[in-house]
Amino acid sequence: MYEHGKGGCMKLFGIVIVCLFMVVPKSSYALNAYGVQIDGSVVVDGQALHLNGFGLRTKMFGKVYLGSLYLAKQTAKSAEVINDPGVKLVRINFLHKRVLKDKFVEALNGALIRNSSSLAGNSDLQRLYALFNKDFIHGEVLDISFSADGTVRVSRNNQVVGSVTSKNVQTAVLKAFIGLSPIDEAVRAGMLGRL
């Protein structure tokens, strides 16, 4: 029998909340980090993906973006993510007032070449870079999705900008975020759930 009154209601409420957290899977609810709502799960190409992890990119001038990785099956191993042919999503929530497109592409290209030097000058890679066609501002969301057929699709604020189909480019972009020499070590560690 539960106590009546304010104290009894609060105890009952607490029990209900604890039970909900025990029953509801971790990946089905949203988190809030650095003022960004991070979805626990998303749907890409008709497949449910779950948040694997997220990390913050910072520079001397402050927070740049929050990068999140969504997978069908969670893992802390970058090789498993890179070698899995399934659907994946990298989501970038921009936190700085303005991130120049050229600086974003420069950082991405640097990591791509460090991890996949054979792609330097690759025409598919150049087509991918062309999809980042304007500066990013605070609050914008960039989605880079990876399909089973090798397609890398770029969306900005839920609007598809374009895509490139190349398994090599797809692998290289994943390595740029979670490979041995990534754009940002903190983002890599966070995406792999190691923070």
Image: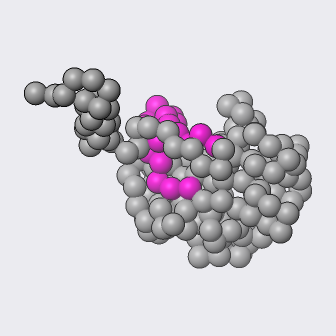
| Residue 63 located left or right of residue 66 | right
For residue 148, say whether it is visible.
Answer: no
Q: Looking at this rendering, what residue extends furthest in the top direction?
A: 4
Q: Estimate the x, y position of residue 126 in percent, counting from the top left.
A: 81, 55
| Residue 152 located left or right of residue 109 | left
Residue at 85% across, 52% down:
99
Residue at 54% across, 59% down:
191
* Quadrant housing residue 109: bottom right
Q: Which residues are magenta?
A: 36-54
Residue at 59% across, 66% down:
188
For residue 177, say whether it is visible.
Answer: yes
Instruction: Name the chief secondary structure element in magenta.
Output: strand
| Residue 20 located left or right of residue 192 | left
The N terminus appears in which quarter of the rendering?
top left
According to the image, what is the colour scheme of the structure?
one colour
Q: Estimate the x, y position of residue 54 in percent, counting from the top left.
A: 56, 56
Residue at 87% across, 48% down:
98
| Residue 194 located left or right of residue 130 | left
Does the segment drawn in magenta span residue 91? Answer: no
Q: Nearer the viewer, residue 52 or 174?
A: 52
Q: Estimate the x, y position of residue 104 in percent, counting from the top left.
A: 81, 57
Q: Is residue 8 above or below residue 135?
A: above
Q: Estimate the x, y position of residue 79 in percent, counting from the top left.
A: 47, 69
Q: Looking at this rendering, what residue extends furthest in the left direction?
A: 1
Q: Is residue 76 above or below residue 91?
A: below
**How many badges with numbers are in the image?**
0
